[in-house]
Image (tube, rainbow, N blue to C red):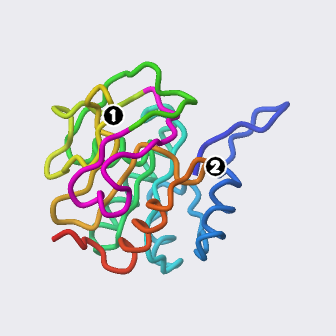
Amino acid sequence: MRVTEATGYKEARDSISHDWLRRLGEWGMTPLLVPNLGNKAPTALDDLKADVLVLTGGDDLGETPERDETEALLLDHALSLEMPVFGVCRGLQLINAHFGGRLTPVEGHAATLHEVSIEGKLEEFYGPKAKVNSFHELGIAPEGLGESLIADALDESGLVEAAHHQTLPIAAVMWHPERKEALEGDRLLMVRLGNEGAFWK
């Protein structure tokens, strides 16, 4: 969940956009929210008995240490359970960093639509090209992709817009499935990931 400040006075809160609640409801999925609990987060994940860990967008890495810690621990724990992980925007950035990748500043990717080329395992969900939304200022160059991550989508300048792990049940996109420009492929990918895990092996 994002870390936000209350309006009018200083009080940090965990929050999530209603777009996510609405979209998952439309897809017949029930969101189970994990607050930024730090080292208690893995226990919460066990208690919720979730099918998929979704690492959502918002907040650049390094801006909110409590969220960084919570999500890193959640990712580690999900991997230990072989639980499928679906990353969105910051989620892809976090996954990339986890596997030793690097981020690079980008321009022209905030509040816009642009075309990406899809290849490999994700092409069955999106086709060879797709127009996606974009709300980020940090991207991933191909040479900055983490170990064992495989690029599935590239933008017009060659930046990585989607990736999956070679053997683990991890897939991630840089665009936002919860926003109004969502693609049907987003739902299909999340369902397949949740049902089959690393279906590309």
Q: Quadrant of residue 93?
A: top left
| Depth check, front residue: 185 or 39 | 185
Q: CA distance from mark 1 to mark 2?
A: 20 Å
On screen, 200 above or below 158? below
Q: Secondary structure at mark 2?
A: loop
**Residue 11 painted magenta:** no
Q: Amino acid at mark 2?
A: Lys
Residue 110 position, x and y percent, is: 53, 27
**Residue 123 painted magenta:** yes
Crowd around label 1: few <14 · some 14–19 · many ≥20 (10 Å) = some
Q: Residue at x 51, y 79 (%)?
A: 47
Q: Is residue 112 left or right of residue 52?
A: right
Q: Is residue 24 left or right of residue 192?
A: right
Q: Residue at x 32, y 58 (%)?
A: 171
Specify start and end residues of the magenta stretch as a single range: 116-137
| Depth check, front residue: 15 or 130 | 130
Q: Is residue 101 left or right of residue 29?
A: left
On screen, 101 above or below 42? above
Q: Quadrant of residue 157?
A: top left
Crowd around label 2: few <14 · some 14–19 · many ≥20 (10 Å) = few
Can you identify the residue that label 1 sits on?
A: 155
